[in-house]
Amino acid sequence: MAAKLKLSPLIAFILLAGMAGMSRAGNIAVYWGQNGKEGTLADACNSGLYAYVMIAFLSTFGNGQTPVLNLAGHCNPRSGGCTGISSYIQTCQSRNIKVLLSLGGGSGSYGLSSKDDARSVADYLWKNFLGGSSSSRPLGSAVLDGIDFDIENGKSAHYDELATFLSQHSSQGKKVILTAAPQCPYPDASLGPALKTGLFDNVWVQFYNNPRASCQYASGDDRNLLRAWRTWTSSVKAGSFYLGLPASPDAARSGGYIPPGDLTSKVLPGVKAAASNYGGIMVWNRYYDVQNNYSGQVKGSV
Ligand SMILES: *[C@@H]1O[C@H](CO)[C@@H](O)[C@H](O)[C@H]1NC(C)=O
């Protein structure tokens, strides 16, 4: 009994010291699913590089359509061929990595036509990917940790309602994590209204394939990036913000690649100093990260 009483303050001290250290270190989030040659979801998680993996994409949904997953060369969801990913999701979760389903993407057929449409998409996601049940879960029985909004088609209507409906499921046991990937020009044309709900846990802002003059890093100059970063992190209420980056020059044909040395020595110190709600970096995508070992090179400084 006496020994226990002596240990408690020590344990408390260790825990507090550990938490203080953790709050300073950032995480890496990555998109997986858009290249069959990037390795499995389990490979991505077993690399030890990531805290979040977004399965990309649910590229067809809304407007009354039956939602369809697109995982490029990995598997064919139309024939139930992606259910094997279920065990990989569990592998990731056993490593304390959060696995999310990403809605949208750069191409696809998606949009929400009404509040009822948002409600039915939320119900579909709950039953087919989250804690609900359905006889035709595209990724099998594993329960994903949340939903990522990567809406890029400029149609913003009803995503605020979708976020609200999804968040209401958090009361049924496990929390439904909500994340979003807006473009760096502020406010975002597609996600602006949704982000105003304040319901998002993590926001990974895409600092690539966007205009240099408004927000993107280019050849040593981080002023535009920092200006946009300050605007995002001070204007939107969210749990934390991530700097969204291409993992290689090929990952973003319209620019925004930051060489690892520039990121760690120049950009990240400014980004961290500018925002106490800094969470880390988001990397597009796992395929290019394997090719370029981007996360491996910068992880120690994130
Ligand atoms: C990636 O880079 C890190 C840091 O330089 C290095 O330790 C690691 O071995 C590299 N990984 C691969 C697969 O090349």
Image (cartoon, helix red, strand yellow):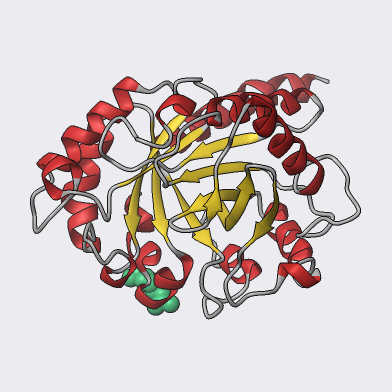
Instruction: Let me know if residue 79 appears in the view.
Output: yes
Q: Residue at x 82, y 59 (%)?
A: 140
- Please state which of residues 194 and 42 is positioned toward the viewer in this rendering: 194
User: Can residue 100 be spotted in the picture?
Assistant: no
Residue 52 at what x, y percent from top left?
Answer: 55, 50
Is 271 above or below relative to 232? below
Determine the image quadrant of residue 85.
Answer: bottom right
In the image, 195 versus 66, the foreground residue is 66
How many numbered callouts? 0
Q: Name the outermost residue toward the bottom.
A: 37
| Quarter of the rendered structure image containing ligand 1 | bottom left
Instruction: Give coordinates of residue 208: x percent, y percent.
Output: 27, 53
Q: Is residue 132 left or right of residue 30?
A: right
Query: In the rendered image of this protein, does residue 66 appear above or below residue 248?
Result: above
The quarter in which the N terminus is drawn is: top right
Residue depicted at x 47% and y 66%: 286
Q: Is residue 127 left or right of residue 251?
A: right
Tell me: residue 28, above or below residue 145: below
The residue under the point 84% across, 40% down is: 132
**Image quarter of residue 178:** top right
Q: Nearer the viewer, residue 218 or 96?
A: 218
Q: Is residue 279 left or right of residue 110?
A: left
Residue depicted at 47% across the width and 37% down the height: 22
Residue 115 pos. (x, y %): 64, 25
| Image quadrant in which you'd find residue 299 | bottom left
How far across and down, in percent of the image, does residue 117 sit? 67, 33
